[in-house]
Amino acid sequence: MHVQTANPAVDIRNLTLGYGSTNVVFDFSLSVYPGEIHALAGENGAGKTTVLKAIRGLLSQTSGEISVSRASNADVHRIGFVLQHDVLPSNMTVASCVQCAALATQQRLESGAVEQYLDHVGLSIRPHVRTSQLTMHQRQLLQLACALSSKPNVLLLDEPTAVMSQPDSDRFWELIKGEVNRGLTVIIATHKLEDIIAHCSHVTVMRTGRHVFTRRAHEVTVQDIIAGMAPETVRVSNTNSSGGEKKRLVHRPVVHITDTDSALILHPLEIHGIAGLDGSGYERWLTAVALTKQEGINVTINGVNIERTTVAQRRALGIAYIPSDRHADAVIVRDSLVSNTSYGSSPNSLAQLLRPISLQMQQVAATAIVDRYDVRPPVVSAGMDTLSGGNQQKFVIGRELERKSQILVLNQPTRGLDRYASAEVSGKLRLASHRDQAAILVYSDDLSFLLSTCDTISTFSNGCLTQTRPVSEWSEAMLVEAIV
């Protein structure tokens, strides 16, 4: 790391920030010096993303000051920003995105420079491919290439590794450290506390929009960060427990999912977990149930084949779905929380179809979700885009669970959630399985979440379902070995 100098790269003094009339950051001060990898840690809704947006100039502060130092020999400061939810235009090519990002800061790219940036961040894709064809991980890497093409002196990162596998995350951190050694200053918001200890120079902990402490990362432990993030009264986590409670699955199976070589069976009351690496083939099993992409998978619900049913008909059958990309498939980000309560719902009859949902009913539903799932800030009239990614996810989970569906399919339900929120989701899923006698199919790359939540876990590798066992017969080491 670079030696601390007298002048901060980013200096924040007594900053207060909000959305509309609701403040979410209060009297916040922070100095980040050149060459630091400075982490912001805190629960969902603590204000981390809001602070990053303010540094980038995307939000106006209610009070306080933010100053950013200029790069050497530069007329203006240059700030790169990799958002948790990208805003890449879907109709542009990868090359155009990188070129536009460079031009925005008056950087002219030489011939072949686009390919060099893509190769530098590990994005193995042709420059003429459109962004709409990229996976979430590829879009994250493209954002990073765009940010670096502007030659920033400060780089802001909002949950950049949330969609990455562990090997991809390791490569990402090596890249960031290399950029820091060449003079970059980095501020990163992340829920991955072990990464803070392993890779960052400093950590600032936030709680409910306020500064708790700033320390050198090597002088704190994960437990120190946790203690700062949440008061003692809520410092409870079941994400490291060794397994879900034992259930007697006495009901007949409700869901059969089969391909030519294997089968996956779901019972009422059962939470069935799926573990596998990206590309291992698990996703087509999820979408075969929740969407209309059968891809060689046969699905029956109570003995009835659903291959020819539409998505709306599947919703009417009681199948709920939480996708991995909430912005693309689960919310309308410019609409309010109230409006988003009815997103993805399907009327059960023609009478319901013809009877519009009243605004009052939507407000009641939104308020219930916000209260029961601890969505912050609890303002149902606010736009979905004013919530942090974690609070958006809590709202989506709450909306689907409150619909009391009979079959729930969840893809990465805890993505972007802190460990307390993840523990709450685990408890809510177990509650739904009992309350609604629901059959729940859930994929997560958080193996400890699967072990603490599920009754059964199946593993996928090389495109195939490989093993299915009760959760009591799995350990995290065994799961890793099975999926790798």
Image: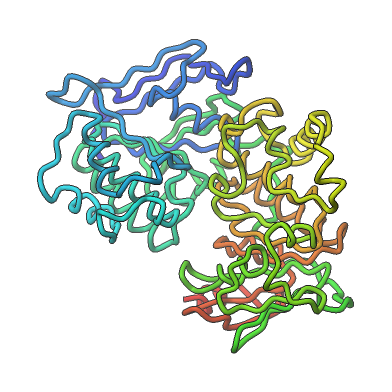
Q: In this view, which residue lies farthest toward the bottom?
A: 261
Up-down: is 131 above or below 380?
Answer: below
- Residue for point 62% across, 40% down: 392
Up-down: is 160 above or below 411?
Answer: above
Q: Quadrant of the N terminus?
A: top left
- Residue for point 59% across, 17% down: 20
The front one of 455 and 143 is 143
Up-down: is 474 above or below 357?
Answer: below
- Residue for point 22% across, 40% down: 99
Residue 195 is situated, as x and y percent measured from the top left of the image, at 44, 50
Q: Is residue 182 left or right of residue 215?
A: left
The front one of 246 and 394 is 394
Up-down: is 162 above or below 367?
Answer: below
The front one of 463 and 311 is 311
Residue 368 is situated, as x and y percent measured from the top left of the image, at 80, 36
The front one of 223 and 467 is 467
Residue 418 is situated, as x and y percent measured from the top left of the image, at 59, 45
Residue 312 in sight from this viewpoint: yes
Residue 2 in sight from this viewpoint: no
Q: Is residue 212 left or right of residue 155?
A: right
